[in-house]
Amino acid sequence: MTVLLDDAEEHVLMAWRHRFAPDIWNWELPGGIIDEGEDPQETALRELIEETGYKPRKIEPLVTFEPAVGMLRNPHHVFLGRGAELVGDATEVNEGKFEWVPVANVPNLIREGKVKNSGTLVGLLHYLALGR
């Protein structure tokens, strides 16, 4: 996943989307599954472009975490993208509607329960607490 900030670092790119298994709507960061032989940062860049059409001007690792430590091995990698360049149209069209959300609104979205995805929560909370 990637916490992608605009050039002024005042907005983060997120999608409002429905997840069928738990039947919930929530705000999520762009991200996806690592292909065999692919580096996690390559995955983050590929998924950003496929889902949003944006490429970060700079990208760096933010945090790697295990969402179910003690039960299974499943590392989640979250990156921080600073600056955004529109390089084309999104090619994955069923990933939700991406919007530039003010960073200042993120704490309230979390408080209101509008961010349910573990990777999104960890990435945003890490950025808010330590990533600036």
Image (spheres, rainbow, N blue to C red):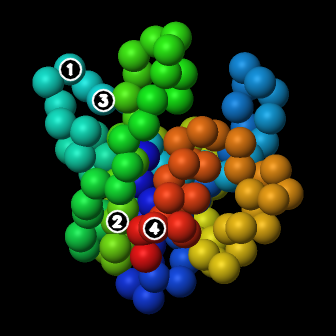
| Residue under the image location 39 percent in, 16 percent down | 73
Q: Tell me the CA gap for discs 1 and 3.
A: 7 Å
Q: Disc 1 vs disc 3: Cβ atoms closer than 8 Å?
A: yes
Q: Residue at x 26, y 63 (%)?
A: 59
Residue 4's x, y, as percent? 43, 65
Query: To which residue does mark 3 refer?
Result: 34
Q: Which of marks 3 and 4 is nearer the N terminus?
A: 3
Q: Which of marks 4 and 1 is nearer the N terminus?
A: 1
- Along the line of sight, which residue is nearer the eye, 52 or 128? 128
In the rendered structure, the answer to whether residue 21 lies left or right of residue 68 reads: right
Q: Mark 2 points at which residue?
A: 81
Circles 3 and 4 in contact, beta carbons < 8 Å:
no
Question: For mark 4, what is the residue?
Answer: 130
C-alpha span from label 2 to label 1: 23 Å
Q: Is residue 16 left or right of residue 108?
A: left
CB within 8 Å, label 2 to label 3 = no
Using the image, tell me which numbered label, if any, was put on residue 36: 1
* Mark 3 or mark 4, whichever is nearer to me: 4
Distance between the Cα atoms at labels 4 and 1? 31 Å
The Cα atoms of the two marked residues, 3 and 4, are separated by 26 Å
Sequence-first disc among 4 and 2: 2
Q: Position of residue 41 (x, y in %)?
A: 23, 46
- Could you tell me how far apart the alpha carbons at marks 4 and 2 are, in whole angstroms? 15 Å
The three-letter amino acid code for the residue at tag 3 is Ile
